[in-house]
Image (cartoon, rainbow, N blue to C red):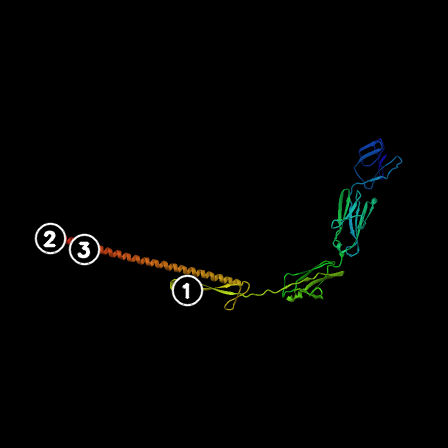
């Protein structure tokens, strides 16, 4: 016999070789079978009341048989995560509890750290415990670890799995107080004579160290001398010395490895070297001579001392040189043009003079020609007159 019941009584009763008999409730029969010693019944729930807890059991007419199975609908659990303290000292016990209530079907837990490692109740060293109350649908699990410096900043995540689904919740980063365990000294590069020592110290620890002390020593066997870097002026004799830093908080202290320093000499100043270059342009007309002195600088990094003792910056010198060069070019161009004009004018004058001589010659030749013609004409008339009157 197969019986389905809730807190108010039987809902269905099914006897071998008979159809199931509905007594009450909001269940519908989907299918059933009654073969040999097997009874199967498929039901569909049309409504459900959580207060009426539905159970299924099977047995004989005397209701003897295995314990009933309770029917519950799927329901996501409610999670909560608690930590016993917000701040821990080394060796204190950290206890993190993860709870899930009201979940259907039953839940299972997993603990995962920030590196992806899983904690398990099956491993004793993980120190994980679990407690469930099926009647109240409530389960919880607790992981307990001893605080250490490497757990500072650690995040633990609780995963709750139920019915193929997973929900999770994480702790805030754990805070573990510990003494500084590392310090690293860093120096400016390069270090030069006459400069202030520039140094910085990188360290860990919780709470962060507030006291940082710097030391200098001649070698590893010499006594350390406390210094303040901002008040320490470097000299060439400091080369080869060792510098270190020490940090401390209320839980302890540590010192960095020493760093050997190398001090370079200060850069030296090189004066300007001045060279003079003379540029000469000769003119053919009037035997004029143009001479201009130009200054050429050899060192671009120092001030240039002029003959009059005044100081000129490289930028001003470059402008002055450019101006002198431009003026020289203009003068040369003007002289060249004047020379060409002189040649052209002289050529024109010579040409005109030759032209005038040619015109005078032609005039004289014409006059002589006309005089000769006139003489010939007079002679011809005279001969003709004599011939007519005297013959």
Residue drawn 20% across and 55% down? Answer: 372
Nearer to us of marks 2 and 1 is: 1
Name the image quarter holding residue 245: bottom right
Q: Which residue is mark 1?
A: 289
Q: Which residue is mark 2?
A: 389
Residue 374 at x, y percent in the picture: 19, 54
Name the image quarter holding residue 358: bottom left
* Residue toward you, 152 or 9: 152
Label located before the other in sequence (3 or 2) = 3
Name the image quarter holding residue 284: bottom left
Residue reaching furthest to the left: 391
C-beta proximity under 8 Å, tags 2 and 1: no
Residue reaching furthest to the right: 62
Label located before the other in sequence (1 or 3) = 1
* Mark 2 secondary-structure assignment: helix
Residue drawn 28% across and 56% down? Answer: 359
Q: Which residue is mark 3?
A: 375
User: Quick check: can you spot residue 291?
Assistant: yes
Residue 99 at x, y percent in the picture: 79, 48
Residue drawn 76% across and 45% down? Answer: 166
């Amino acid at each position: 016999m197969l019986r389905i019941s809730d807190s108010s009584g039987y809902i269905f009763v099914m006897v071998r070789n008979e159809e199931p008999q509905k007594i009450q409730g909001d269940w519908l029969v989907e299918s059933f079978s009654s073969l040999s010693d097997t009874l199967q019944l498929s039901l569909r729930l049309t409504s459900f009341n959580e207060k009426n807890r539905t159970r299924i059991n099977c047995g004989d007419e005397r209701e003897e048989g295995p314990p009933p199975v309770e029917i519950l609908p799927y329901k996501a659990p409610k999670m909560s995560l608690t930590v016993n303290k917000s701040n821990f000292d080394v060796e204190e016990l950290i206890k993190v509890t993860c709870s899930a209530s009201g979940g259907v079907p039953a839940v299972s837990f997993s603990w995962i750290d920030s590196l992806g490692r899983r904690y398990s109740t099956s491993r004793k060293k993980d120190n994980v415990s679990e407690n469930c109350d099926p009647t109240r649908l409530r389960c919880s699990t607790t992981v307990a670890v001893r605080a250490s410096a490497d757990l500072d900043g650690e995040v633990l995540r609780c995963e709750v799995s139920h019915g193929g689904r997973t929900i999770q919740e994480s702790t805030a980063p754990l805070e573990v107080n510990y003494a500084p365990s590392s310090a690293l000294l860093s120096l400016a590069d390069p270090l030069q004579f006459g400069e202030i020592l520039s140094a910085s110290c990188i360290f860990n620890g919780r709470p962060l160290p507030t006291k940082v002390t710097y030391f200098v020593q001649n070698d590893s066997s010499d006594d350390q001398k406390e210094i303040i870097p901002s008040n320490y002026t470097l000299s060439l004799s400091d080369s080869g010395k060792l510098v270190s830093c020490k940090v401390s908080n209320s839980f302890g202290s540590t010192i960095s490895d020493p760093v050997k320093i190398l001090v370079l000499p200060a850069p030296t100043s090189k004066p300007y070297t001045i060279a003079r270059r003379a540029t000469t342009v000769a003119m053919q007309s009037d035997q004029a001579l143009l001479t201009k002195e130009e200054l050429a600088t050899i060192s671009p990094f120092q001030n240039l001392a002029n003959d009059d003792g005044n100081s000129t910056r490289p930028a001003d010198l470059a402008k002055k040189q450019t101006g002198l060069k431009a003026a020289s070019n203009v003068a040369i161009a003007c002289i060249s043009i004047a020379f060409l004009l002189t040649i052209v004018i002289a050529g024109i004058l010579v040409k005109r003079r030759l032209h005038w001589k040619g015109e005078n010659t032609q005039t004289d030749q014409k006059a002589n020609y006309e005089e000769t013609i006139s003489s010939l004409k007079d002679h011809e008339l005279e001969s003709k007159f004599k011939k007519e009157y005297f013959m």
